[in-house]
Image (tube, rainbow, N blue to C red):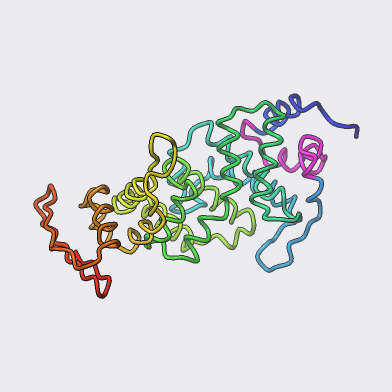
Amino acid sequence: MGEGPCPLEGGKALHRAIYDDQPDALLVALHRTRLLEILIPDFKKLKGLVQHDHYHRFTADAHLVQTLREVQRAKSSKRIFGVIGKLTKDLSTHDWWALKLTALFHDLAKGRKGDHSTEGAKLVEKYFTNWGYSESLKDDVRWLVESHLLMSTAAFRQNPQAQTTWKRLFARGVEGRRLTLLALFTAIDIRATNPEAWTPWKAQLLLNLVENMRSPEAKSLQGHLAFAHRKNKSGKPADKQADKLEEWLVALDPLMLQMIPPRLLTGDLKEAASAKADLPVKLWQAKNGRLWVRYHEKKTSRVCF
C-alpha cells in the first residue's frame, strides 16, 4: 500500500474526506478500504482490538468510525440524542469539525501503556502539527480527547449539584463553549459504544450537569476559585493558602458565594484560620440589602455566617 501521503497532503486528504457530511456508506468505506490507516497510521494498531465487557459493542477501530457517524447524526437527527440534542444549536462549523476529528482520535491510544486519554492527546499534537492544522483546532481537539471521559463520570457517578463536582470540572477547563462540546461528545461517544446504552435518563442527567455548571451558583464558585488562585505581577501565586482556601470555599453555602465578594470572603476566611483568639463579630450588607453576620469561635475552629 506504500508509505502513504506526505504529512501535509494527509491532512488535506482527511479534510476532503470527512469535513463535509458524508453518507454512512462512505464513512464505512473509508474504514474497510483501509484509507483511514493510510492517513492515520496509528489507526491500524486498533484493528480488531476487542474490549471484553458487556458495554462495548464494537472493536476499537470500528468504534471510532461509529463515533464519526454519530457526530453526523447529532447534526442531522438531533432528536435521537434526546434533551441533550438542544446543545447542537450553539455549535459553529469549526465546532463540528473539531467533533469529527475528536471522534477519530479519542480512543486512538487504546491498548497502549498509560492512560489512553492522555496518550491520545499526544497523538493529536503529533498529527495536527504534521498536517499543518490551526493551533485553535489542535487545542480544541487535544483538550476534548484528553477530557472525553470527565463528564460521564461527573454526570453518572458523582453529584452534579455538588460544588466539589463543579470544582473538579472547572479545574480541567470545562466551561463555556468547551462545556457544550464535551457534553455533546459524551453523548455521541456513549451512543457509538452501544446505542442501547444511551437512554432518556442519561440524557437528562447529562443536561442537568450542563445546566448546573452554567448556573449562577457555579459561576460564583468559579469566580471565587479564580480569585484564590490569582497570580501576582511576577506570575507567581498571589496567595500561598490558595489550596486551603479552595477547600473552604467548596464547603460554603452557594448563596454566600453569590452574595459576598471574593476579596472580602477569602480575606475573612484567612483571618479566621490564623486567628489566635475568637474574632469579633463582623457585619456586612450585600447590595440587595441582605445582612450577613459572621461569628468565629477559635476553640472549635467554627466560622458561621
Picture coordinates of residue 36 (x, y %)?
A: 77, 39
Q: Is residue 206 left or right of residue 55?
A: left
Count of numbered marks: 0
Q: Which residue is farthest right?
A: 2
Residue 279 vertical placement versus 104 (above, below): below
Picture coordinates of residue 20 (x, y %)?
A: 62, 31
Which span of residues is magenta-colored?
19-43
Does the magenta portion include 165?
no
Image quarter in which the N terminus is found: top right
Picture coordinates of residue 210 (x, y %)?
A: 41, 52
- The quadrant holding residue 72 is top right
Query: Closest to the observer: 129 or 251?
Result: 251
Residue drawn at point x = 59 percent, y = 56 percent = 190
Residue 157 vertical placement versus 32 (above, below): below
Image quarter in which the C terminus is found: bottom left
Residue 266 vertical placement versus 13 (above, below): below
- The quadrant holding residue 292 is bottom left
